[in-house]
Image (tube, rainbow, N blue to C red):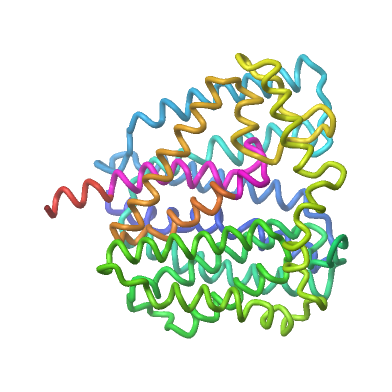
Amino acid sequence: MMTREKHLSTLYPLFLGLTLAGYPVISSLTSIAGIDSSAPAILFRFVILAVAVLVFFQLDGVKGRLYKGQTWLLIGALWLMLIARLTYETGFSGQEFTYSTTPRLWIFALGACLLPMIATAVIPDEAWIRKAHTWALHALMFAAVCALGAALFFAPVVTGFAERASTERLAPIPMGHLGVTLCIVSLWPLMLNQAWRGGVAKLLFGFFLGAGTVIVSASRGPFVILVVVCLLMGAAGIHFRGRKIPKWTMVGGSIIFIGGPLVALLLGARSDYALFVRLMNSGAIDAEAGGRATLLPDAFSQFTASPLLGSGMVEVNTQMYPHNFYLEAFMATGIFGGFIMLALVFMAARCAWRLLIWKTPAGWLGLIFIQYMLYGAMSLSLYLEGTFWTLMALMFTLEFAARRDRQKTS
């Protein structure tokens, strides 16, 4: 049993690190190398799945490490409806998808979203979470350096209302969210005033690197979410620090608003601070053909035409997913699946908040879940985004473990 515990202490952090940072690394490296990322990306998903399976089956003979909460019933019910819709759309209706092939949809839905969640049923030690934090920080820093290098020196720039950096295979939005995640992982130890063996300088470098990545990507969503995350960290700090806002949260917010453009300039971003140009022109950008100003209302109208069973996976005018997790759930599964999705996200968000205010070592994962919860309201597809599903399921397990530990010490 000790051997299995030892294996878990390595496999579990590896699973979390790959989930959070693996794909940006793959995308950036393939852009720098000038090769197609499709095959490496799919292979990478299978690696995560293999690690998840190994984590789960290492539980054999290890007692007290399996979370069996009733939320698994809700997740299972929702996924039965999602798979039923995917089966109908790909096997019977003849639906064509402009954003993915049918085999890729199935590979990502099952191999990247559904099956890796089995690893989140494992209740981790605090030491595993701390190791995962260290590994994730280094991997995210490496990914951000690669992404910035690829975007600024090796890949074309997306044009529109203002130029914004991207790589050929890591678009501006996920590039921006890479920066948000790096900021969260870097700020969390500073917020708790915990000693970190890597030193404060490395954490500050990680935050500057993450903030620079957000600014250079010139994506509005990641920037707004980063501001929200900083506010949440401040609110959590008020809760557990006697109504005193953590100094690192205030410093972080100041850097975002004041130092961000400076960092972007130093990193080689285009003139006029593209992010702020895009923020000022948000209405016009959303009104572009295929923009959210038309996509979301059309998708909602499509759902209301068939609310009981849902209307489909894509919005019929654009043949695209609606770029909103919650609306997509109602479209794909009907009113029952949609409300299950909302209930799961609400409960997971409550768990994430508890992880924050209880000052658990896993609080940073709660913040990243909130990031992806908001990310899903602005972009992404339920069938393609495995990181969201892993983090959501993880919230229930981590909150259960933290609550159990609090009861033991009270």
**Which residue is found at the position 30% from the left and 61% from the top?**
239
Q: Is residue 171 left or right of residue 332?
A: right
Frontmost residue, 82 versus 288? 288
Q: Does residue 380 belong to the magenta stretch?
A: yes
Q: Which residues are magenta?
A: 375-401
Q: Is residue 122 left or right of residue 168?
A: left
Q: Residue furthest left?
A: 410
Examine the rendered structure and indicate whether residue 108 appears above or below residue 14: above
Examine the rendered structure and indicate whether residue 234 appears above or below residue 398: below
Q: Is residue 404 left or right of residue 81?
A: left
Frontmost residue, 118 versus 88? 88
Q: Residue 73 occupies which quadrant of the picture?
A: top left
**Which residue is found at the position 75% from the left and 22% from the top?**
90
**Which residue is found at the position 71% from the left and 51% from the top?**
41
Q: Residue 9 occupies which quadrant of the picture?
A: bottom left
**Residue 202 drawn at (x, y percent):** 50, 81
Examine the rendered structure and indicate whether residue 385 appears above or below residue 308: below
Judged by its main secondary structure, the magenta piece is: helix
**Residue 19 drawn at (x, y percent):** 55, 53
**Residue 381 drawn at (x, y percent):** 67, 39
**Residue 249 drawn at (x, y percent):** 44, 72
